[in-house]
Image: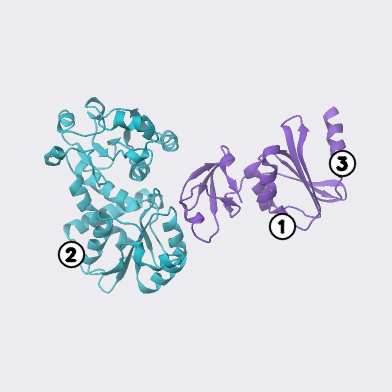
Chain colours: A purple, B cyan
Amino acid sequence: MEKDIKDKKELKVAALRNGTVIDHIPSDKLFKVISILKLSNCKCQMTFGFNLESHKLGKKGIIKVADKFLKQDEVNKVAVLAPNAKINIIKDYEVAEKKTLELPDEINGSIKCINPKCITNNEPMQSKFVTIDKEKGLFKCYYCERVVKSEDLIIE
Amino acid sequence: MSVKSLVSISDYSKEKILQILEKASAFEKNPNQKILDGKVVATLFFEPSTRTRLSFETAVNRLGGRVIGFADASTTSGTKGETLKDTIKMVSNYVDLIVMRNPIEGAARYASEVASVPVVNAGDGANQHPTQTMLDLYSIQKTQGKLDNLKICMVGDLKYGRTVHSLLMAMSHFNPTFSFIAPDELKMPDEYKMFCKKNGIRYEEHSELSENNIADADILYMTRVQKERFTDLFEYEKVKNIYILKNSLLEHTKANMKILHPLPRVNEIEQEVDENEKAYYFEQARNGVFARQAVICDLLGL
C-alpha cells in the first residue's frame, strides 16, 4: 500500500499526458536503453531519471517519452538490456496499455559484435544477432557465430 | 537469397551429411568424370593455404571444370579498398560457384547473402571450415566402417581449434563418446560441453596425453598446441612436451584405432608415427578431394 502511494508520487514528478513510460530500468542500463531505442534522434520531449531510489533494484532509471508510443518490436529491444523493465503506454494521464517484454528472435542493427575480426566490424553493413537462449539471455552473431551474454552486448 | 551455400557445418542435417558422404565415396571410386564440363569455379583465397586450395582445385579439375581465382589477397582490388560485397558481386557474374577463404569471421555468411551463385566456405578465420569436417567424417566412416557409437579422442588445442568444434557438432548426430585431452588453458569451451550435456552425449576430460587416456579410442584426433595461444609462457613450457604423440604411446591402443590430424603438423606427432599403420592423416588429406567434389556437385544440383 505504502509502495503504491510512493509510485504514484513519483509519477506525478513529471506526469505524462500521452506517451510511453519505461520504468524499473537498472541504472547502469539506462543510457544503453536510450541508445538502443535511438532516442537521441527523436524530436519528442523526454525526461530521464537516473539513480532514483528503488526498493527492488536499489538504483533505477526511468524514461518518459511524450507523444511517442513504443511498438512491440521496439519494446522487445528493451528486453535485451532490461528484461524486468515495465513499459506503460499513457493516454490522457492514464495507463492505457501495459506492454509485456519478450526477447526478440532476431535483432538487426543496434548491437555491435564484440569480435573485432567479425565481418560486421570490417564491412559497411548492419549487424544481426539471433537469440539462442531467451532464459539465459544468450545471443549469437549471425555472421561470426560468436555467442554473447546480454550483459556483454555492445549497444551502438 | 535462395541460392544454396555451405557456410557452416550446421547448415547440413544428418541426412544431408550421409548423402554427401555417399557421393564422396562414389567419387573416390571414379574421381575423373566430366560432370563440371563447361563450368567455372572461383577460388578466392584472401589468406594463404596449401591443402585446402589445392584440393578444391584438384576436385574441380578432375571433374572437368575450370578454375579462376587468386591465392593471395595482395593481388586484388581489396588492397584499393574494395569491399568484400563488391568483389563477390563481381565474381558472381563470372562463375558458377565461389570457394572462399577469408581471415574475417562471418565473411562467408555475408558473401553467401550477396552472391548470386553458391558459396563454399573454405575457412573464415577461427569460425568455420565445413569441408574439413566433411572430409574428417568421410575419413572416420571409411576407416571404421560406420559413424555410430564411436569413441572420439580429441587432443591438443580444444579451445581455439575450429576443426574440433565443428567435428563435435557434426558427430553429435551419431551417438559418440568424446574424450577431451587438453592443457588447462586450452580446454574445450563450456559452450560445447553444455551442448553435449543438452544432447545426452557422454564426454570425459583429461589434461594429459597418456597411454591410459587413449586406450579405448576409435579415433585419435590430434591438433597442434600453439605457443601463441598461451598467455603464460611458463604454462606452455610445462605442457608442450606432454602433447607429442609417439609410437610408445600407441602400443596398447585398439587395433581399429586411427590417428587423424587436420594438418599442418609441426611437432605434435613424431615422424616415427608416420610409418605406424594407425597413422591416417595423409590419406585423410587425400579424402578432402572426394569430399569437396561431393559438396560442389551437391550445391550445383549435379
Above or below, comparing residue A155 to residue A50 in the picture: below
Q: What residue sits right under mark 1 in the picture?
A: A41
Q: Do the residues at pointers 3 and 2 share their chain?
A: no
Q: Which of the two marks, 3 or 2, is nearer to us in this view?
A: 3
Quadrant of residue B82 within the rendered picture: bottom left
Of circles 2 and 1, the one toward us is: 1
Query: x, y (%) of residue A154?
Result: 58, 46
B97 left or right, relative to A152:
left
Q: Residue at x 58, y 50 (%)?
A: A111
Pick the residue in front: B18 or A96.
A96
* Residue B219 vertical placement versus B92 (above, below): above
Which mark is drawn over residue A13?
Answer: 3
On screen, residue B242 versus residue A60, left or right, reads: left
Residue where numbered disc 2 is placed: B32
Q: Nearer the viewer, residue B239 or B187?
A: B239
Q: CA distance from mark 3 to mark 2?
A: 80 Å
Residues marked 3 and 1, same chain: yes
Q: Quadrant of residue A15?
A: top right
Three-letter amino acid code of the residue under disc 2:
Asn
Q: Residue at x 82, y 30 (%)?
A: A3
In three-dimensional space, the C-alpha distance between marks 2 and 1, rounded to whole angstroms, equals 61 Å
Q: Label 1 lies in what chain? A: A
Q: Secondary structure at mark 1?
A: helix
Q: Secondary structure at mark 2?
A: loop
Amino acid type at mark 3: Val
| Residue A102 visible from this viewpoint | no
Residue at 15% over, 40% down: B271
Name the subunit of mark 2.
B
- Mark 2 vs mark 1: same chain? no
